[in-house]
Image (cartoon, rainbow, N blue to C red):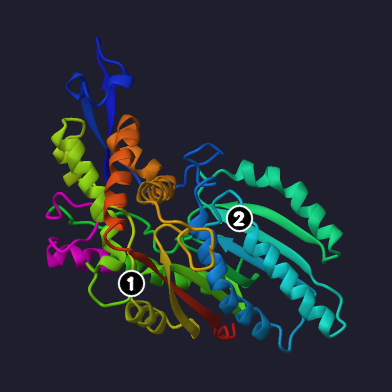
Amino acid sequence: MKTFLYKRLKGATHDQYPAHRSKFKKVAMVAVSVPCMNGGRGETSYAKNSDIQRTVISKAWPFLEETIKDMFSSSFPGCFNVADLGCSSGPNTLLVVSKLIETINKLYHQVNKKSPEFQVFLNDLPGNDFNSIFESLPDFYKRIKKDKFGPCFIAGMPGSFYERLFQSRSINFIHSSYSVHWLSKVPENLETNKRNIYITKSSPPSVCQAFLEQFQRDFSAFLSLRSEEIVSGGRMFLTFIGRSIADPSSKDCCRLWELLTKALIQLVNEGLVEEADVDSFNLPCYFPCEEEVKSIVREQGSFILDTFESFEVNWDPSDDVNNKSFVFNKDRCGQNVANSIRAVTEPTLASHFGNAVIDPLFARFATLVAEHLAVEKTKHISLVISMTRKQHAQP
């Protein structure tokens, strides 16, 4: 993916960009596409706008709990090493860890075993807001001590999960929620995907194939890397956005991005964004179907696929059957969805289009989403897979 530096010339300020883009000298440079969430605790931060991720964790928990119970059906190690990949920051970061520790301690107590010690590695890209996580640890440790759980040691592990992160055969359990659909980079050869930022019905077949092949390479590499780090018989539990049918341009995964593209085109028509910049931008993500995931797991060969499940989540997570107080308001729902998407895409979008377009872009996006939800309630498809590491070959 290409991004650009804009050198400020006399008479133009960065606040005026992109309205005075002609006063900036464009210098092309190659940039690694590494999406991070919005840090901090501001109104547009991931910490304030991650309700949908929390809902997904809650819906996936019964499957995760079964995985843990099966894992401890016969073996009770004295130390349990856990890695959470793509942990981000905010109230969800330690949620799964808390529930895992509580569940495992109950299992140990049921058989009169001493609670294990826990070593937890929280992984995300180096740009993640790890400071916010570390600031929350004293309160977390207090709760652990109060509940008389086994000792827990938490460490940050910055780096891409498309590279090695841990020592060989050192991790018992790997968890990742809503992260593996992010690719290591934008696929190549997407020049024909004009006026689109992801796959759509108008995308040529070559574009769909390019996204699929990048996901195949990335997910296969992810499995291979984790297979080196996890112990024989260790488990890996992944939840990510996918789709329910084979068509990669289905509304399951594409409609939301079509609306974001439409908002960008509105800015193009208003002279705030250059059409060439839209044509050269594509999101570094892919939302696979069941067979695509299973095929990669089979071909990579290091893991046994134990469980494959899927469930739906409304774009606006507050619109949930369990939320008895929910009253549909299209504008509020549109803004909720816009805030959640902004929290995960703003750094990527700003690096390509500039910070000045972000507010008007998501204002228009919120309106488009509101209009869409007033006609049709669309849902995210979440895929859940639980795997066991096959026995390592003897040296």
- In the rendering, at what x and y percent does residue 191 appear? 14, 52
Q: Quadrant of residue 363?
A: top left
- Asked whether, in this view, residue 286 is left or right of residue 108, the answer is left
Q: Which mark is residue 223?
A: none
Q: Residues within 10 Å of mark 2 (few under 14, many from 20)?
A: some
- Dot 2 corresponds to which residue? 93
**Which residue lies at the image location 75% right of the left edge and 58% below the top edge?**
153
Q: Which residues are magenta?
A: 192-213
Q: Quadrant of the C terminus?
A: bottom right
Q: Position of residue 168 (x, y in %)?
A: 60, 69
Say if 33 sits above or below 293 in the image: above
Element type where label 1 sits in the image:
loop
Residue where numbered disc 1 is placed: 243
Q: Residue at x 48, y 77 (%)?
A: 385
Residue 214 spot, x, y in % from top left: 30, 64
Can you say whether 194 is above or below 8 in the image? below
**Residue neighbourhood size for the residue with mark 1, other residues' Cα within 10 Å, grouped as few (<14), some (14–19), many (≥20):** many
Q: Disc 1 residue type?
A: Arg
